[in-house]
Amino acid sequence: MAKIGFFSPAELTDSQFHRISEFIQKNVGIKMPEEKRLMVQSRLTGRLKSLKMSNFDDYLNFAFSGTLEGSEEIALMINAITTNLTNFFRENVHFEYLTDTVLPELAQKNIKKVELWSAGCSTGQEPYTLSIVMQEFMKKNPGKIDDYSVYATDISSRVLDKAIDAVYPMSEVESLSLELKKRYFLKSKDTVNPSVRLKPEIRQKVSFDRLNFMAPSYPRTTEKNVIFCRNVLIYFDKPTQESVVRKLLEHLMPGGYLFLGHSETIFGMDLPLKTVGPTIFKKI
Ligand SMILES: C[S@@+](CC[C@H](N)C(=O)[O-])C[C@H]1O[C@@H](n2cnc3c(N)ncnc32)[C@H](O)[C@@H]1O
């Protein structure tokens, strides 16, 4: 293994890129066309640097060595390659629909505990937004819904660690109302890098788990009333998207709701879903 005293960025050759892209597409589902080569190169450069390796052949031989260290490196490779962009109340129309339509309907059906799943939860802003929305609904509609739980999953251990910490730069909550900020976030004392942390009552309702959508089936947890799987399918090819949605639907109650990202579609898929809003679907 070539070790170097200083670091100069290595180039990812065609064959090295194909080795990675085939592996990622097969095991993570993410499409890896040639246009992603530079992105992969730049994102994995940090891994080479940490391992003090000067070229991608050494890196790939190590990662794919079949050893325990290799499999740990593969997890870090996946962490580096996945795109984790997210924010609080992202695509807010979905949270409005949840508050105005879904929750009153569930309350009317006398469902006292609502089960939600944020599938592909990234650093936690989506499941914590769901937790805030539930608390707000319960506060404004006393006696309608008593309890809820949010199950949140992602493939990346790095984002899950951040999500569990629940600490975010102050800038991430700037667009939220003062009322929500005061009610659900604690402010750090650090004035140089101000941050916020979700209050325990919001965090305690969210449980995190590592789950790869490529798994043949998903863990048998309680059936869900609501599943958010947003801005994840976009990275997969059509057959993979359909297979993921099908597996998610096994965990959604009949009459439950599935929310996808705004640029995602189930068009052309033969699924027991009807469209009820912008990328909002109800299980038939
Ligand atoms: C762009 S983020 C979306 C976060 C959030 N749902 C939202 O809309 O703001 C996509 C997330 O999907 C996760 N992801 C990608 N491939 C996955 C897979 N095969 N299994 C589970 N999660 C995956 C990534 O790690 C990333 O955190």
Image (cartoon, rainbow, N blue to C red):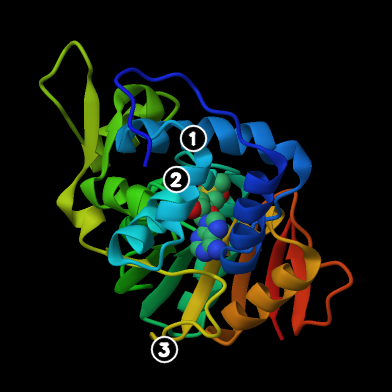
Report whether residue 136 is seen. no
N-term-proximal mark, 2 vs 3: 2
The N terminus: image quadrant: top left
Q: How many marks?
A: 3
Residue type pointed to by label 2: Tyr
Q: Picture coordinates of residue 220 (x, y %)?
A: 41, 88
Disc 2 designates what residue?
59
Q: Which residue is drawn at 76% across and 47% down?
A: 33
Label 2 vs label 3: CA separation?
A: 37 Å
Image side of residue 13 versus residue 271, left or right: left
Are there few (<14), some (14-19), or many (20+) residues within 10 Å of tag 2? many
Residue 142 occupies quadrant: bottom left
Marking on residue 220? 3
Kind of residue at badge 3: Arg
Horizontal relation, residue 171 to residue 9: left or right: left
Please tell me the numbered disc located at residue 212: none
Q: Report which quarter residue 138 is drawn in.
A: bottom left
The residue furthest left is: 189
Q: Marks 1 and 3, Cα distance to the nearest angstrom?
A: 42 Å
**Residue 182 percent coordinates (x, y):** 24, 33
